Amino acid sequence: MTQQLAIGPHTVRPPVVLAPMAGITNAPFRTLCREFSGGRGLFVSEMITTRALVERDAKTMRLIRFDASEKPRSIQLYGVDPATVGKAVRMIADEDLADHIDLNFGCPVPKVTRKGGGSALPYKRPLLRAILREAVTGAGRAAGDDEDAQGHRRRPHSPIWTPAASPWRRASPPSPCTAAPPPSTTAAPPTGRPSRG
C-alpha cells in the first residue's frame, strides 16, 4: 500500500512535501518540481510575511501567485503578531488565494528568531497559542465555521485548513525557510596526528 498524507480534504501521495524556502520555491521552481514528479506531492510557496500580505505589498502579491496547474495551492505564512496572522489567513480564504496554509514554526535564521518567530515560537507557548487561535478563527470566519473530526476548520467552498490546537497535532514535514548550503567539494583536513605503526 502506498503511503499518503491527508491534509483536510487533500491527499498527498506519496507523502512528499517540497519545503518552503525563501528565494527558492517560487512559481517556476515549483512548476519544474511538479513536472519531474508527475504532479505528485505538495509544493509550498516561499515564506510569506503576514504583515506584507495584509498590507498588499506588491512584491508579496507576486510571490503568492500560482500557476493554474498548481493544485492544491499551498502558502507558508510567517508572523509574530496574532491579529495580523488572523487577518492574513482570512484574506487568503476570502480571496481564494490558496487551498492550504503552512504556518512557520521552524525557521532557525537569526533575523527571524530574534523577532520571536520561526523556531523561537514553540518556546513561547502563550504567543504560539494566540497565533494558532487567530489563524483558525480567521479561516473559520471566512465563510462560516465548519470543523472536521480532527479539529480543523475550513471555508466550505475553498478549503483552508489550519491546525486548531497544536502544530504537532498532525504529522507534517519540517518547513525550513532557507536553502541549505551546497556540500563541500574539498576534503576536510585531517584531525589529530597520524598513528605510528
Image (cartoon, rainbow, N blue to C red):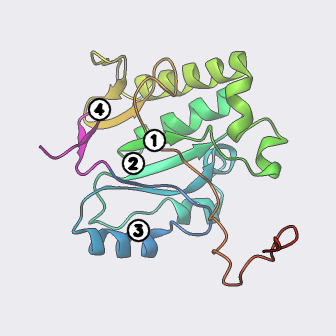
Nearest the eye: 196 or 143 = 196
Q: Earlier in the sequence, mark 2 or mark 4?
A: 4
Total numbered labels: 4
Q: Secondary structure at mark 3?
A: helix
The residue pinned by badge 1 equals 101
Q: Nearer the viewer, mark 3 or mark 2?
A: 3
The residue pinned by badge 2 equals 98
Is there a contact, CB below 8 Å, between mark 2 and mark 4?
A: no
Residue range (magenta): 1-15
Nearest the eye: 105 or 68 = 105
Residue at coordinates 88% horizontally, 71% vertically from top-left?
Answer: 193
Residue at coordinates 67% horizontally, 48% vertically from top-left?
Answer: 55
Residue at coordinates 58% horizontally, 30% vertically from top-left?
Answer: 86
What amino acid is labelled 2 in the image?
Ala
Name the disc covering residue 30, or none: 3
In what quadrant of the picture does the C terminus appear? bottom right
Name the disc covering residue 8, or none: 4
Is there a contact, CB below 8 Å, between mark 1 and mark 2?
A: yes
